Amino acid sequence: MARLDGRVAIVTGGANGIGRAVAERLARDGASVVVADLAAAGDDVAAGIEQAGGSAAFVATDVTRDDDLRRMIDAAVARFGRLDVLVNNAGVGACVPFAQLTPETWDRVHAVNLRAVYRACQLALPALVSRRGVIVNVASQSGLVGQAMNEAYCASKGGVVLLTRSLARELGPQGVRVNCVCPGGVETAMLDGFLESIGAAPGDVAQHVPLRRFAEPAEVASVVSFLVSDDASYVTGAAIPVDGGGTA
């Protein structure tokens, strides 16, 4: 048996990058997966999982809208009968000099990266409590250390880390585990955009990482799969760096 056989998982931001890798890995490990994303490519991800012999469904979701989050959760329960795992991965960035950071950009980053995590956890809570389920939030290395010209993103991801730890304390007595992963540089479109905005060459930046390279999305997905499995049954409240030693 695969270690997630019979489990049902939601992955937000599941159409691309880390979210896609997480959805595909959880499916390979036996979970039925709801791929939640605004991008229509999420439908292709779900179809690919099904073609590979897994079980998946795409639900078009704007994580900043409570009605969409409710529909996402209801769809998981209606399609697969329950909800065991919530992976809050959807995120956006904004790399600009602080003097140019607008309130509108700040609000947008926090709406997607932090408020949506809080609301998805809250709305999914009844279903998760009934299954003694698991939440994994995708934070960032940027939630553990500061970065110039990245204040909105760092603040939002730092909020995800402490939201995770607070929820772990409150929900532990109800049997719900809550952890987060904190990726460093990962080979995704978001990283490409960040490097372009600061005018940096990928190879030059990677040389500052102890492992001398960026991560592949699948390497983050492997840690998520561990955290949602019974192998991590006594792990809660953790913020695990997946950053090649960048915050060591």
Image: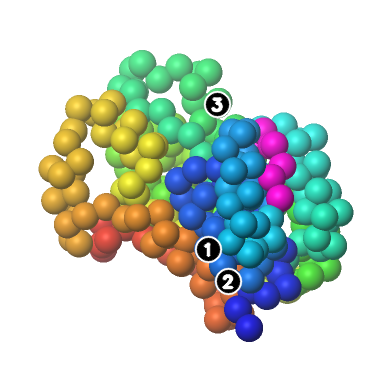
> Residue 171 vs residue 220: left or right?
right
- Give whichever of discs 2 and 3 has the lower sequence position: 2
In this figure, which residue is indicated by the disc labeled 1? 25
Q: Which residue is mark 3?
A: 108
Q: Which mark is residue 198?
A: none
Check the image and report above or below for 245 versus 158. Answer: below
Counting from the top left corner in percent of width and height, residue 112 is at: 58, 35
Which of the 4 image quadrants contains residue 98? top left
Is disc 1 placed on a helix, strand or loop?
A: helix
Q: Is residue 138 left or right of residue 9?
A: left
- Amino acid, disc 2: Asp
Looking at the image, is mark 3 or mark 1 earlier in the sequence? 1
Front one among 116 and 30: 30
* Image quadrant in which the C terminus is located: bottom left
Query: Which three-letter amino acid code belongs to the residue tagged 1?
Result: Arg
Residue range corresponding to the magenta coloring? 57-63
- Residue ID at (73%, 73%): 6
| Mark 1–mark 2 distance (CA, rounded to whole Å) | 6 Å
Mark 3 crowd level (few <14, some 14–19, many ≥20, 10 Å Cα): some
SS state under label 2: loop
**Separation of marks 2 and 3 at Cα, in angstroms:** 34 Å
Is 59 contained in the magenta span?
yes
Residue sitting nearer the eye, 213 or 128: 213
